[in-house]
Image: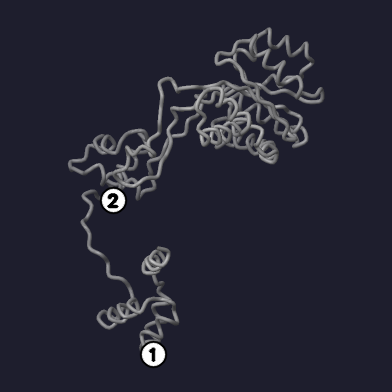
Amino acid sequence: MSITCNWYFRKMVRIDDYVRLSIISKLEAGETQRSVAGEFHVSQSAVHKLWIKFKATGSIKNAKRPGKSCKLSIREKRMLCRGCLKEPFSSASAIFKNCNFDKTLSPCSVRRILRSAGLLSRTAAMKPMLSKVNVRKRKQWCRDYSVFQPADWSKVVFSDETKLEIFPTCRRLVRRRKGTRLQNNLVCKTMKYGGFSIMVWGAIKGDGSRTLIKCPIRLNSSAYQTVLESGLIGLYDSSETFMQDGAPPHRSASTLAYLERKNVCLLSDWPPQSPDLNIIENLWAQLKKKVLERFPRNSEELWKVTLEEWNSIPNENIRKLYASIPRRLDAVRRNNGRHSKY
């Protein structure tokens, strides 16, 4: 099988113009096609076809292949691309229809024109909605904390909650052959309401230390304080700062009073709608991927697998996330407080 594949890819290799000229000069000097093919590591048939083409046309260039001309002019193609930029979430048929051309064109042809202009169909990124106030606060927060050094960030304990599902409803990609869409091992199994799921709270430190606590699906202030008592108090050091987002249980009066009683220094001005600034979000993505690969069968097994995979995350991964914080702040500032790639 490997010999067949190697032969196939060898036949598909394109010979550049310099090698073609060298082959022609060797053949004109009287060398055999077999010796020339061995010298340049190409097939003898390729040398023979090149020699026949050169004698017939006097050129080494490939002839232009005929093809059906496009119905749209260059100007109309530009109009089509502008229409796509104005309505990026519209289908190819809708974009063509909105341009009001007095011509007919198949959706396949429209997509081909848009692809040739670099307008490719991709899965849209899912990001939180940002109001003008959110944007302003994010930009100001990144500007204020840009003076922090890596040593300062290493003393910040990042925390967050996330939900893990055995049968998630998120979109997944699969690589398959044509006609195998409904093959059992190629479909993404789902259950109503996501099947079994658990909610977890986690916290990480700059040296790689971390904790993970299983918590109720609906978390109120009282339950959140119980989680902090179990997970944060043993991890937190008096020289550190605790980070939490602006979820209602986090900023309630009773929770803030609890943190004050425990002498926890809180990073109280965390900007709203800013998961891209919370480095623990990247760990959630890694964790969910690893958990899904193990296919837990019930909620108890899901929690067991989640805990094992959480503890197996290398400390180096966490240290790299802490090192990325200055870059995250800079990215948000350069985007004027809007979404960043993180």
Quadrant of residue 84 in the image? top left
Q: Earlier in the sequence, mark 1 or mark 2?
A: 1
Q: Nearer the viewer, mark 1 or mark 2?
A: 1
Side (left or right) of 112 relative to 277: left
Q: Residue at x 40, y 21 (%)?
A: 192
Residue at which label 1 appears: 31
Residue 117 visible in the shown view: yes
Give the image location of residue 212, x and y in percent: 66, 25
Side (left or right) of 250 relative to 97: right
Given residues 107 and 167, the one toward you in this image is: 167
- Residue at the farthest bottom position: 30
Three-letter residue code for mark 2: Ile
Given residues 98 and 174, the one toward you in this image is: 174
- Circle 1: is it few (<14), some (14-19), or many (20+) Cα within 10 Å? few
Q: Which residue is drawn at 38% across and 39% down?
A: 186
Position of the C terminus by quadrant: top right
